[in-house]
Image (cartoon, grey):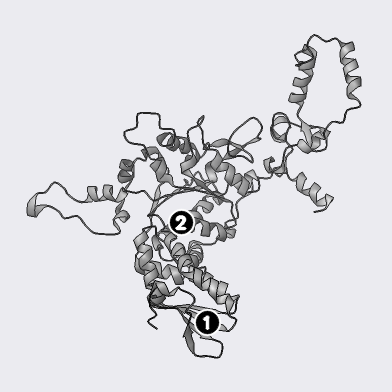
Amino acid sequence: MTDQENNDRTSEYEEVCYMCRRPESQCGRLMTIGPNLHICADCMQKTFDAFQSGNVPGLNGMNMQDISKMSDQFKNLNFPDLGSLGVPERQKVKKKKPKEEGETAPVFDIKKIPAPHKIKAKLDEYVVGQEHAKKAISVAVYNHYKRIAADTSDGVEIEKSNLLLIGPTGSGKTFLVKTLARLLDVPLAIADATSLTEAGYIGDDIESVLSKLLAAADNDVERCEQGIVFIDEIDKIAKKKNMNSRDVSGESVQQELLKLLEGSEVEVPVGSGSKNAMVPMTTVDTSNILFICGGAFPDLEDIVKERIHDRGGIGFTAALPSEDKNVLQKVTVEDLRKFGMIPEFLGRLPIIAVLEPLDKDFLVRILTEPKNAITKQYQKLLAMDEVRLEFAPEALDLIAERAMEKGTGARALRAILEEYMMDIMYEIPKDDAIGSVTITREYLEGKGAPLIEMRGYAPARIEEARPAAEGPDNG
């Protein structure tokens, strides 16, 4: 990068006082006392006042003649370049564009955001199933940016609709939001609620959530105020039951998050996750920031079943418990309140979308249908060695069955395939004559070897890919 490019990039950001860490927009014009070293008038005046009052440590009791002699001795000393100790660029805020006289606030261009059906169509390429959740998140995002672009001169103000995603682990909550981030040209930050604590305790402050969004917006406050925040593991901040000590990471965190979800001006540390004296602060308005919360909410099914089914009956008149796997689809705000979420917090998340649990057929589709499916990733790896990789349908069924046993949803698929494919990925590059490999159920069960096809020869099997001790070859 040339010096001219460096100067142009630096001019986009506000300078920060080296002493008090306030940006130029808050403390006024800064005085430059060295390269990359700036001090505001207040800090400079405080320094002069300290010298005049004699409250400088080490100089008390010394007259001007002694100080003059000491300064002569310092002339021959080499001091470090204080310019190198200036405020780093990641802690500087971008300058706001000056408005011309009579110019109104810039209106958000809604044309840059695709329509809900287009957002869902893109999500369909990467996420299998979960139709209700994909529709809900597509509509919520589109309506949110229509709200930003709406004209409020007629007195009609559209309220913000934050979103709550509920689903078992591995059902795709985080993956949905990450995929959405790639599709939209808006800043998006993903935070973890488990690290948040009440202000004053060890852990991340609530404002650290906005610090990540500000960093994703390249420290541009105006762009940050139109972004999306996803707070994962939101169920971990539920009220703790039977707790005698202060709950600094549960109900108190929900109360601290209320101001962010509702919309308010918050002091946010720039370039850091916590507030301290050496980090610049800037003000961020959360009124136009869309918040999406997600959590697995374990044991919530029991609360829903207890509400739905009448457990008061005895004998033949008693209602039998239902085996409905989609019982979470019937969740209500009252169920979430019993789980431990406070009513004020739930009131600021009006849209609730429940993700479906993953069954065997669901997992088989995840293995093959998405654009970046796991099997396609392995096929691409072997294609770089000019080898074609195929999976027998029976082998995919077995992988899905093993994933169901682990109980961690789609996350288990990767671990299972890594285990089965390790020998294949190790043996295939040994022989340049191999043209294709087919993974069979017998190979995965340890009863045989995968089918291979040599270049110009009939299909064969890889005997070296699995030790003979694991099972006989039924091929």
The quadrant in which the N terminus is found is bottom right
Q: Position of residue 390 (x, y in %)?
A: 48, 78
Q: Residue at x 66, y 32 (%)?
A: 278
Please tell me which residue lies in front, 194 or 320: 194
Q: Position of residue 469 (x, y in %)?
A: 41, 72
Q: So how many labels did they put on this image?
A: 2
Tell me which amino acid carries mark 2.
Answer: Ile
Q: Position of residue 434 (x, y in %)?
A: 55, 82
Tell me which amino acid carries mark 1.
Answer: Ser
In the depicted structure, whether residue 467 falls above or below residue 158: below
Q: Is residue 22 left or right of residue 420?
A: right
State the CA–CA distance, disc 1 to disc 2: 41 Å
Please tell me which residue lies in front, 336 or 450: 450
The quadrant in which the C terminus is found is bottom left
Q: Of helix, strand and loop, which one carries label 2?
A: helix
**Circle 2 residue:** 137
**Circle 1 residue:** 436
Please tell me which residue lies in front, 18 or 376: 376
How busy is the neighbourhood of tag 1: few (under 14 within 10 Å), some, or many (20 plus)? some
